[in-house]
Image: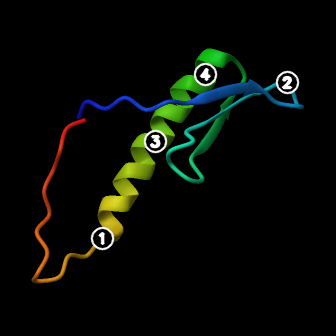
């Protein structure tokens, strides 16, 4: 899967770096370093997108297609 999403990384109050993906509501992560926060948000995004697929149950009138962005 090839997809580009924007993320926001900022310093948290506790010394950690906090990252989130604004286009995926509730998709947040953190890390001790900026690099770790970026790696953690990548994993969070993959889990977020995977969970969405598992929750969707198509009806007989719906067809599920995949697109690459």
The residue labelled by disc 3 is 45
Q: Are marks 2 and 4 in contact (CB under 8 Å)?
A: no
Q: Earlier in the sequence, mark 4 or mark 1?
A: 4
Q: CA distance from mark 2 to mark 3?
A: 23 Å
Which element carries disc 3, helix, strand or loop? helix
Q: CA distance from mark 3 to mark 4?
A: 14 Å
The residue labelled by disc 4 is 36
Q: CA distance from mark 2 to mark 1?
A: 38 Å
Which element carries disc 4, helix, strand or loop? helix
Percent x, y for residue 19? Answer: 64, 32
Is the residue marked by circle 3 packed among few (<14), some (14-19), or many (20+) residues within 10 Å?
Answer: some
Q: Earlier in the sequence, mark 3 or mark 4?
A: 4
The residue labelled by disc 1 is 56
Q: Are marks 2 and 3 in contact (CB under 8 Å)?
A: no
Residue 15: mark in rendering: 2
Q: Residue drawn 35% across and 70% down?
A: 55
Say which quadrant the C terminus sits in. top left
Q: CA distance from mark 2 to mark 4?
A: 13 Å
Foreground label between 4 and 1? 1
């Amino acid at each position: 899967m090839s997809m580009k999403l924007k993320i926001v990384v900022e310093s948290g109050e506790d010394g950690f770096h906090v990252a989130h993906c604004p286009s995926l509501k509730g998709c947040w992560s953190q890390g001790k370093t900026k690099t770790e926060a970026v790696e953690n948000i990548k994993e969070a995004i993959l889990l977020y997108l995977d969970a969405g697929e598992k929750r969707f149950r198509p009806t007989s009138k719906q067809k599920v297609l995949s697109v690459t962005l």
